Amino acid sequence: MDARIPTLVLGGTGYVAGEVIRLVLGHPNLQLAGVMSDSQPGEPVGRSFPHLAAVLGDTRFLSQAEIEQQVSTLPRSAVFSAAPHGVSAALIDTLLRRAEAKGTKPRVVDISADYRYSTAEAYAAVYKHEHGAPARLKDFTCAVPEHLKAVTTPHVAHPGCFATATLLAAVPLLATGLAAGSDAGAGGSGAGSGAGGPTLFVSGVTGSTGSGRKPVEGTHHPTRHSDLYSYNALVHRHIPEIRACARAASGVDADFAFVPHSGPFARGIHVTVQAQLAAPTDTATVLARLREFYAGASFVRVLDAAPRVKDIVASNYAHLSAAANGRTVAVMCVVDNLNKGAAGGAVQWMNRLFGLPETAGLAAPAAGWT
C-alpha cells in the first residue's frame, strides 16, 4: 500500500479534531484531504488551530456537502468523526449512504459516544435522546485497541478518555482472575456483579481539555486553577460504557464505582482502580501479571514506580503501575485524554482497519515538562 490514504476529519474545530489533524499531518500513510466545519466553511483551518497553521498552509474548512462529495468519489478514505455526541451518528450515516450508493469504501472511526453502544436503547438510556442512526450500530465495534485482536466490523468507535484509562487498568484484573469475584477471567461463568461479580472502585482526575473547547464553569481557568474537585460521583455517563467494554474484553460483568475529578491541568488523565484480591497477592506478582497481559502492546508500559501524567502528555502511550497488600490491589494508569484517550487511539484503530503498522504516526514520545 504505497499511496497515502485520503483522510477526512469531521467536527473540525474542537480540541479532539485539532489533535486528529496534528497526528494526520505527521502520519506516513495518511494524507489530510478535508476538514469539515458547517459553521465555518471556507475559513482557514489554521485560524482555529494556530499551533498547526505553519503546516496547514491555506487549507480551509469544507462544508458537509463538500465532504460528502469527497467520500462518494474517493475509492477509499479514512474518516475520523470528532463531531459532538448526538450529531455524529446521523452525519456518519449520511456519508456512508453516499459512499454505498457510489461503491466507495471509506473506513470510519467515531470518537464521539454515538457508536459505543450495541443497541439504540442502551445509548438512549445514557444520553436521554434517541440514537441518530440505529440501523448503523451493527457496523461498529467499540473497544480499546489493546483489548481486541481482530476487528470484524468495517468501522470502529473509540471509547471515551476516562473509559480508556479505566479499562486499561481494570481489564487485566478481571481477565486474569486477580479481582475477587472475577471467576470468568480464570475460566468461570462470568456472573454479574449482582450475583457475585466484582466491584471495582475507580477514582480519576482529568485535565480541562476533556470538557471540550467551549468555556464553561468547570473549565474556566480562574475556577479550575489550583483546585481539585469531584463531579458526577457514582453516576458518570461513562460507567455503562466502561462496564460493557470490560465485559466484552474479559468475560466478567463487573460493577464500577467511579468518582471523576477535575484537575488543574490542561491535558492528561490519572486513574486509580482498586479491587479486593481473589487470593493473597503481592505487588511484584501483580506487576508481572500486568506485563504478561500487555506483552506485545506497543503503547502500554508497566512501571515499577507510580506513573506520572507529565510523562505521557501529547503521546499515545499509557503508563501503568500497581500496588497490592495481600488483600487489596490498586492499579494506576495515566494517559493523555486528547491523544491515547481520543485522537491517538482513533488513529491506532485506523491503522488496523487499513492493515498498517499499529504504531504508524504514533511512536513519538511524550513532550515532557509540560
Image: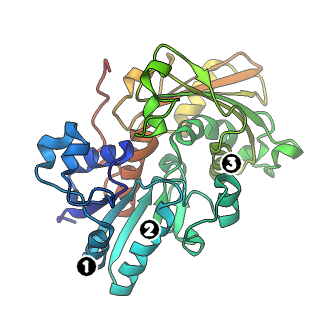
Nearer to us in this view, 244 or 79: 79
**Sequence order check, earlier mark of 3 and 2:** 2
Q: Residue at x 76, y 27 (%)?
A: 277
Quick one: quadrant of the N terminus? Answer: bottom left
Residue type, label 1:
Thr
Residue 317 showing in the rendered view: yes
Report if the CB atoms under discs 3 and 1 are less than 8 Å apart: no
Q: Which residue is situated farthest in the right direction here?
A: 195
- The x, y position of residue 198, in whole percent, is 78, 38
**15 is higher (above) or lower (below) than 2:** above
- Residue 155 x/y as whole percent: 46, 65
Q: Which mark lies nearer to you, 3 or 2?
A: 2
Give the Cα distance between marks 3 and 1.
38 Å
- Mark 2 falls on what kind of element? helix
> Which residue is denoted by mark 3 in the rendering?
240
- Residue 239's quadrant in the figure? top right
Q: Is residue 308 above or below residue 85?
A: above
Q: Residue tagged by mark 1?
A: 73
Mark 1, other Cα within 10 Å: few <14 / some 14–19 / many ≥20 = some
User: In the picture provided, is 34 more to the left or to the right than 218?
Assistant: left
Please report whichever mark, 3 or 1, sits nearer to the chain's N-terminal start. Answer: 1
Tag 3: residue type?
Answer: Pro
